[in-house]
Image (tube, rainbow, N blue to C red):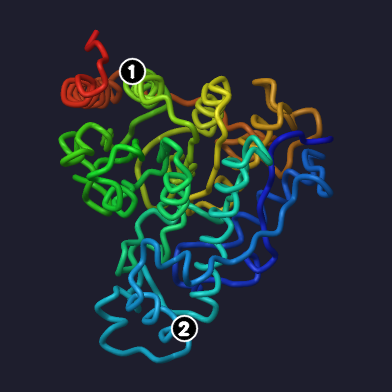
Amino acid sequence: MTVDGIWFIHSNRFDEIAYPAECPFRTERAGAALATVRRLGLLDETRSLIEPPPASLEELRRLHTPAYLEALQRAEAGQVDESALWAGLGTPETPIFPGMYEYAALAAGATLFAARAVAEGRVRAAFQPSGGFHHAHADRAAGFCYLNDVALACEELARLGKRVLFLDLDVHHCDGVQEFFYARRDVMTISLHQSGKTLFPYTGFEDDIGEGDGVGFSVNLPLPPQTDDAAYLRAFDKVVWPLIGAFDPDVLIVEWGMDTLAQDPLAQLQLTNNTPAAIARRLMTLGKPTVHTGGGGYHVENTSRGWALLWAEWTGADTGEDLAAGLGGVMLGTGDWLGGLRDRPHSLDGAARAPVDAEVDAVIAHVMRVVFPHHGLSLR
């Protein structure tokens, strides 16, 4: 199949460098997604598979401090001193391992490369599944994240004069990205995530809407555990969709963390991969240049399959039915998955749904009340 207008950005180094075995983050997810789209014949490798460059120190210094970058490089070389500890390095969630800096710099370079390509009109969209390190701060690592590739890409696009929307669909709040742009209005951040009352990084509440010139341009939808497809899509349609229209970005960056899916071992939302696919289809109607990144997702098979389904959406191969159902599936099915790419539909029953719906609807109403007036949107 010839893919027109979207790139799959990947390097073999993403498959070769690994976090320590005891760490839940698995770098092989991107390669597994690539293998799946190859098996389904959805990739024209001569036109659409792109090898990215690593980010340079000069590029990384646009948001990260020189002292922090030096600490990262020294730690990778085995020189762990007090500066590394202050930078958050060497914890269970930010371990020090061979290739740590190389991997992070390559991921940052790949997302920057994608951002420049869509901004320059060389491609309408690009998928960088090894990106989405939204917890990294200017001078500190956190949450498996060392360099904030998505924030660097947002900054690069803003430098090029673009209005940028960062839409984060990972289960965790994008605290690092929000921090970089909290007082700015050229980059809007919208995050749908499991509430910080119950999940790392314990931030991203309804009243966190920016400061100074940025008031109204940081938007958070903290959702309760057990939120299912219907409730999640309701939050997207009532809050996110109107805000995208009002902000009217030049470029979108979307983080597709698959840790929102049921069975993810680190979170408690109950989505199926039909929901990200439905959102992908909505976003495509905007006709905006878009950078897609990966993000979280700690059930490797579900994550790679979810990203493959998104690729099928972006390339026009998915019709809403299960793409691989007639091919015997991509792998063997389980009790929750019958083979192919799509999950079995799932929703909460009546007794479980009522409290979840009540909390989701309260979040929606509150965010509309505090954010919509800044964009001239009706509360109806």
Q: From what the image shows, is residue 276 above or below residue 331?
A: above
Count of number-bearing discs: 2
**Marked residue nearer the N-terminal end (2 or 1):** 2
Residue 310: percent from left, percent from top: 61, 35
Give the Cα distance between marks 2 and 1: 45 Å
Q: From what the image shows, is residue 82 above or below residue 340?
A: below
Identity, as a three-letter code, of the amino acid under mark 1: Lys
Identity, as a three-letter code, of the amino acid under mark 2: Glu
Residue 233: percent from left, percent from top: 41, 23
> Residue at 67% of width from left, 39% of height from top?
123
Secondary structure under tag 2 reads helix
108 vs 192, nearest the viewer? 108
Q: Quadrant of residue 234?
A: top left
- Kindly identify which residue carries mark 1: 238
- Kindly identify which residue carries mark 2: 76
Residue 115: percent from left, percent from top: 55, 47
Secondary structure under tag 1 reads helix
Residue 41: percent from left, percent from top: 82, 40
Give neighbour class at mark 2: few <14, some 14-19, many 20+ (Cα, 10 Å): some
Give the residue furthest to the top. 380
> Residue at 26% of width from left, 52% of height from top?
179
Give neighbour class at mark 1: few <14, some 14-19, many 20+ (Cα, 10 Å): some
> Residue at 29% of width from left, 75% of height from top?
87
- Judged left or right of residue 208, residue 237 is right
56 vs 269, nearest the viewer? 56
68 vs 208, nearest the viewer? 68
